[in-house]
Image (cartoon, grey):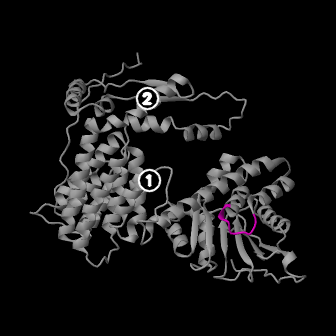
Amino acid sequence: MNTTQPISLLLCALGGEGGGVLSEWLIHAARAAGYPAQATSIPGVAQRTGATTYYLEIYPTPLNQLQGLSPVLGLTPMPGRLDMLVSSELLETARQIGNGMTSEHITRVITSSSRILTTQEKMQMGDGRSDSEALLSLVRQHSLRHHVMDMAALTRQAGTVVSAVMLGAIAGSGALPWGREVFEEVIQKTGGASASASLRGFALGYAHLASQEVQAQQLAGWLSEDNTHNMPPTPALSQAVSQTLSAALAQFPLAIRERVVLGHARCVEYQSVDYGNLYLERLQTVLQAEQKADPTGTQAWACTHETARWLALWMAFDDIVRVADLKSRQSRWHRVQSEVKAQEADLLKVYDHFKPGVPEFAAMLPTRWADALMRWENKRTAKGRSPWALPLKIGTHSVLGMLALRTLAACKSLRPWGSRYALEQSLMTQWYGAVIKGLHQSADLGLELARCGQLIKGYGSTNERGKHNLLHILAQALNPTVPQTAESVAHWRQAALKDDAGQALDTQLRAQGALARPVREQPIRWMRKPPSRGG
């Protein structure tokens, strides 16, 4: 820390969010810790066309070490000289970045991912919202370090105002030269009747940012050039897993290692260590093909990056075991308690409703048994009967209910023996195999085929339609009789995402000289005409 220059902070808050209280908390905390500090504010404009900003400068040397001297502190922020920008709204963060306040060399940005629409956004006839992804990209480009959190959700969880969460995030960043206890003491002294709620919000903001700091340190070790001896231990991974991941990461370029780490962790948590290693092996085959198609890495290994993203999501597909695991987690119970604002003396009962059908039960059975069960179901529906399902109401708050869910969640070790697992793995192999074939033709075609992994989403009929569209696009893109370009595949993917019925996709396929999707058989169901109520 530079002890000759003041620490400069710019706070952005909307009306009613307690920005003035936040500024006072910081000034009181600085002075309580013995540091010189000064704050000024610039009011915003009504009707959500601007936020009130508060500018603070804190001299990092205590008064008792200045030998009677007093530092001169500024009244207004200097563009490109901010040490920290803290904002409760994403677009306000982007506005300050657009004003040139931040620098990618010195500024740490703490921002909320939540949005409160501006007057201009609300006036549009259609969807006038600003693109949040573009705003986040701006934050990443113009900050030395950035932390993004849903401050609105944390505020609701704590039952307070966002200023308390912002203060906790500032304290958790470690950018100010005093400890957490000073902040909490100031809140207790000045918070009055709302001090307990403010302390809850402070604690949530502090914990959220502190956890991001820990993750950033772990990723820094994983993503370093020499990560074979610098792999930090983590609670989620054993030492053996860490060593395996460390050795595998050395084969991936630095630009995509973060994505690979996150995807591997998801697969290990979903199934097992071996499943995570399978994820790495699949990615390595794609990377080898991309290195041949683009030896200089002009696309920054975008194809492998996209494959890593969608492959991790696909490999962690939803099934009844996954649902049971998520429904019975302690974090979910805590979230429900916070949402209903249950007090210590309140009696909370939670009931979960399930309606598994034949496909859900068949998914956990070996392929031979599953096929027999599905044939029985298909015969029933062909006769016009409704699909069979088993309605269940499980009290998650009860011992028996929780035991039932945890027992089902423990069945993940049986998942690889089920027909759904075999089917999903087969389809994944077709997809990333097509990506590799596309790379053999051109790097652009391989990249667009990798992006088609986005079509696999949701569950039930939505998931089935996505797979149907994906397989048809792969077949048409690699059809040797009618070769297609990367641009054509991009149009098909966008059309498939735009229209749930698939008409837009069929139109695009025909326009590019490809075959439209074959019509799928649908059972005909006869409905009785209700009797008329007339005379």
* Residue on which disc 1 sits: 239
- Residue under numbered circle 2: 407
Most common secondary structure along the magenta stretch: loop
The amino acid beneath tag 2 is Thr
- Find the magenta span and give its range: 172-178
Q: Are there few (<14), some (14-19), or many (20+) residues within 10 Å of tag 1?
A: some
Residue at figure coordinates x 62%, y 58% from the top left: 210
Residue at image location 81% in from the left, 50% down from the top: 195
Q: How many marks?
A: 2
- Residue in the foreground of this view, choosing between 488 and 87: 87
Seen from the viewer's position, the closer of residues 359 and 258 is 258
Q: Nearer the viewer, residue 22 or 383?
A: 22
Q: Outermost residue, right direction? A: 68
Is 103 part of what is drawn in magenta?
A: no
Residue 379 location, x and y as percent?
Answer: 20, 25
Using the image, tell me which numbered label, if any, was put on residue 329: none
Residue in the image at 62% along x and 79% along y: 99
**Residue 253 visible, this angle:** yes
Indicate the quadrant containing the N terminus: top left, top right, bottom left or bottom right.
bottom right
